[in-house]
Image: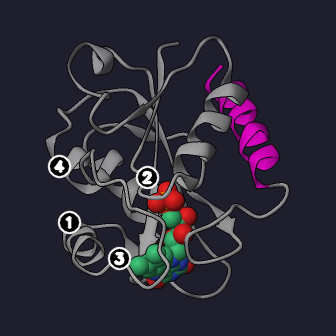
């Protein structure tokens, strides 16, 4: 089963979760940025696992990233805007026939989700839902991830591998 974990990450939290999920899936599954997950890397993929941060109550967007670029916030670590938003990556993804799973990273609370939006976009491209969208929680605005979240991400990856057979 060819599996790719693809992510957008501005401060590294979603990247860390993506790598932990890929480890949990095993079998040398790559975790790729939206810049890396193109062309041959995405040919004949059986399972796409995609994740991105929640900004301004929604899945990260080009507008939210532009706001971050212009006004990163007082005391913010430098943002990494070197790879495209997952939204634009999803828009450009050619139709396929594999399966999919979606995740986001966010603070704890009722402050919006991104994973359900990712899941719908992947489904609309022909990638059937393998598992319900899920979220991983950071302790502060810029991270770090809460204790135990990387372990949970690894376990979720292992569960996806089991479900994907
Ligand atoms: C400008 C900004 C806006 C944010 N907005 C939200 C939000 O609306 N809801 C939420 O749950 N988390 C919000 N967060 C927390 C981020 O979702 C969280 O830090 C995420 O893990 C960042 O991912 P990254 O490190 O991969 O870029 C926000 C963080 C920043 C810096």
Distance from the alpha carbon under mark 1 to that under mark 2: 13 Å
At x 20% / y 71%, what residue is drawn? 66
Distance from the alpha carbon under mark 3 to that under mark 1: 14 Å
Q: Which residue is mark 2?
A: 9
SS for callout 3: loop
Distance from the alpha carbon under mark 4 to that under mark 1: 12 Å
At x 27% / y 15%, what residue is drawn? 43
**One can see residue 102 in this view:** yes
Q: Which residue is mark 3?
A: 72
First in sequence: mark 4 vs mark 3: 3
Instruction: Check contact, mark 1 vs mark 2: CB within 8 A.
Output: no
At x 75% / y 37%, what residue is drawn? 154
Q: Is residue 20 left or right of residue 148?
A: left
Q: Which residue is mark 4?
A: 91
Instruction: Check contact, mark 4 vs mark 1: CB within 8 A.
Output: no
Q: Mark 4 against mark 1, which lies toward the viewer? A: 1
Mark 2 Cβ and ligand 1 under 8 Å apart: yes
Q: How is the image coloured?
A: one colour
Q: Is residue 156 magenta?
A: yes
Image quadrant containing the C terminus: top right
Instruction: Check contact, mark 2 vs mark 3: CB within 8 A.
Output: no
Mark 3 Cβ and ligand 1 under 8 Å apart: yes
Residue 48 quadrant? top left
Extent of the magenta region? 149-165
First in sequence: mark 1 vs mark 2: 2
């Amino acid at each position: 089963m060819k599996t790719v974990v693809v992510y957008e990450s501005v401060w590294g939290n979603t990247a860390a979760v993506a790598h932990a999920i890929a480890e949990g899936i095993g079998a040398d599954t790559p975790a790729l940025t939206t810049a890396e997950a193109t062309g041959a890397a995405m040919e004949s993929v059986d399972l796409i696992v995609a994740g991105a941060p929640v900004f301004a109550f929604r899945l990260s967007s080009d507008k939210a990233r532009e706001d971050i670029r212009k006004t990163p916030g007082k005391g913010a670590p430098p943002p990494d805007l070197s790879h495209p938003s997952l939204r634009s990556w999803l828009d450009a993804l050619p139709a396929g026939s594999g399966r999919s799973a979606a995740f986001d990273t966010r603070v704890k609370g009722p402050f919006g989700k991104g994973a359900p939006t990712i899941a719908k976009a992947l489904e609309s491209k022909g990638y059937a839902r393998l598992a319900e969208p899920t979220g991983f929680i950071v302790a502060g605005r810029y991270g770090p991830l809460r204790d135990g979240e990387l372990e949970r991400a690894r376990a979720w990856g292992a569960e996806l591998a089991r479900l994907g057979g």
